[in-house]
Image (cartoon, helix red, strand yellow):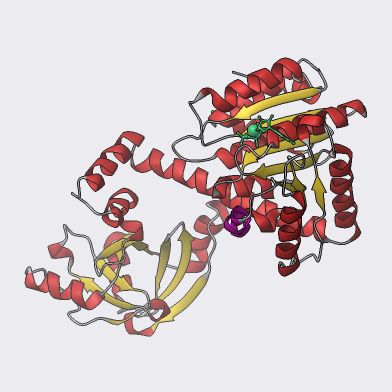
Amino acid sequence: MTVSIDKLLAGDTRAIARAITTVENGVDGAVELMKAVFAKTGRALVIGITGAPGAGKSSLVDKLALHYRDKGERVGIICVDPTSPFSGGAILGDRIRMATLGLDKNVFIRSMATRGNLGGLSRATADAVAILDAAGFDKVIVETVGVGQDEVEIVKTADVSIVVLVPGMGDDIQAIKAGIMEIGDVFAINKADREGVLRTQKELEALLSLAHRPDFWNPPIVKTIATENKGIEDLSTAIESYRAFQKQGDASLTRKKAIAHWRLIELLRERLLTDMLRRTGSETELDDLAGRIASKEIDLYSAVEELVGPTLSKGPGLRYINHLGVATKGIDEALGFWVDALGLENVHTEVVEDQKVRVAMLPIGESRIELLEPTSDDSPISKFIEKRGGGIHHIAVEVGDIESVLAKLKAKGVRLIDEVPRTGAEGCLVAFIHPSSANGVLLELVQTK
Ligand SMILES: Nc1nc2c(ncn2[C@@H]2O[C@H](COP(=O)(O)OP(=O)(O)OP(=O)(O)O)[C@@H](O)[C@H]2O)c(=O)[nH]1
Ligand SMILES: [Mg+2]
């Protein structure tokens, strides 16, 4: 499925819907799409609305959307409901809404309810917001049930966050205060036609007076009756007042930076996980492992080690190739190839007196090429070059505990050049294993301190 960027930017409804599906599925093309969209974002006001189930969020969103539309603005609405990905509830509700609001070409409604195995719902939602922003919507409203961490995070990415409460919540306010209280820039007490509005307001005021926001903003409390379209103007004014406040100081930039930081981590998490699974195993394997954990065959931590492999292993044994030693007649001349032509960087040069060599270290990933140059005619490297004219001299393997690895090798009858570790380049502990025990390879063990 290809998305026409031009149509999307022109506000074409089908192009927008396709674009959102693309980022939701995380399919190929999503990355290019989001890169293309980026430059066009930053114009819309993003409003996040959260609150307990049934508080009247959808009703409020609809009324707010109509309010903006009547002022000639275009409004995009995204409903996030990860709690009911398959049940018809939210979707059905949204269908009915779409039948009324959605017919309006200045209002776009979309629900996001799918959560892939690898998470990514909040990333997809943020992408959808960016798409609507780029498509020219003046306001983008994101509605989410304030129950989980994801949902709270989603609302945090809005320019203005509204928390919806209802009268008579009493103890509930206490319960939810830890989660969503601190994210409200504006509070709406909806269903203000019910009893106990004043009491809820007092309780909320008391709680807010205890909270200390870093930006010293005093969140306004607005009373609304969504079903009767009451208090919507006040709500919109409260939103504007927070916007005006944000623009005064550097709060807006601080917030944007915090959001970017969060989104970066979110995307990185998803990307690394996808990459790792692509490299080390399929989702089927993940499923198998889950089964083995459930039947107590394997513990969670060992399962992760099985997947991630030895790069994370912290045991005494072999960890990774620390470097490949390459014998050269002269390092400076050799750099012409390794640095100038190949593009590696020489990060460290040193003379190791003990072994009569000068070395240069050129990192590649977690490993390195170590260029070796003899410092005298009786250097082992001189002899090597005499015999072979240069080439790979040794392979160095990083170990967790060099003493214990040496002890194990000795017990197995391996011929060691160094039975006791000595100090090598960069002050590491090193020991060599004789080529006669290792198929003609000179193997060096390294323990970086
Ligand atoms: N009395 C009264 N009822 C309201 C008001 N606002 C919404 N409702 C009703 O409350 C119920 C829930 O409203 P929704 O707008 O679906 O609430 P929600 O928070 O979006 O619900 P979920 O998305 O399921 O969490 C509906 O029956 C609404 O008609 C209000 O101000 N007063
Ligand atoms: Mg709703």
Which residue is located at x 35 percent, y 58 percent? Answer: 311
Q: Position of residue 288 (x, y in %)?
A: 26, 38
Q: In the image, is residue 390 above or below residue 157?
A: below
In this view, which residue lies farthest toward the front?
195
Viewer-side residue, 157 vs 288: 157
117 is within the stretch colored magenta: no
The residue segment tinted magenta is 171-179
In the image, taking residue 417 as reference, residue 195 lies left or right, namely right
Q: In the image, is residue 379 above or below residue 181?
A: below
Q: Position of residue 151 (x, y in %)?
A: 59, 45
Q: Quadrant of ligand 2?
A: top right
Q: Quadrant of the N terminus?
A: top right
Prevalent SS, magenta region: helix
Q: Position of residue 294 (x, y in %)?
A: 25, 45
Viewer-side residue, 132 vs 62: 62
Q: Position of residue 444 (x, y in %)?
A: 27, 69
Q: In the image, is residue 420 above or below residue 230?
A: below
Which residue is located at x 74 percent, y 19 percent? Answer: 102
Which quadrant would residue 313 be assigned to in this image? bottom left
Question: Residue 390, can we see it?
Answer: no
In the image, taking residue 27 as reference, residue 66 lies left or right, namely right
Which quadrant would residue 106 be assigned to in this image? top right
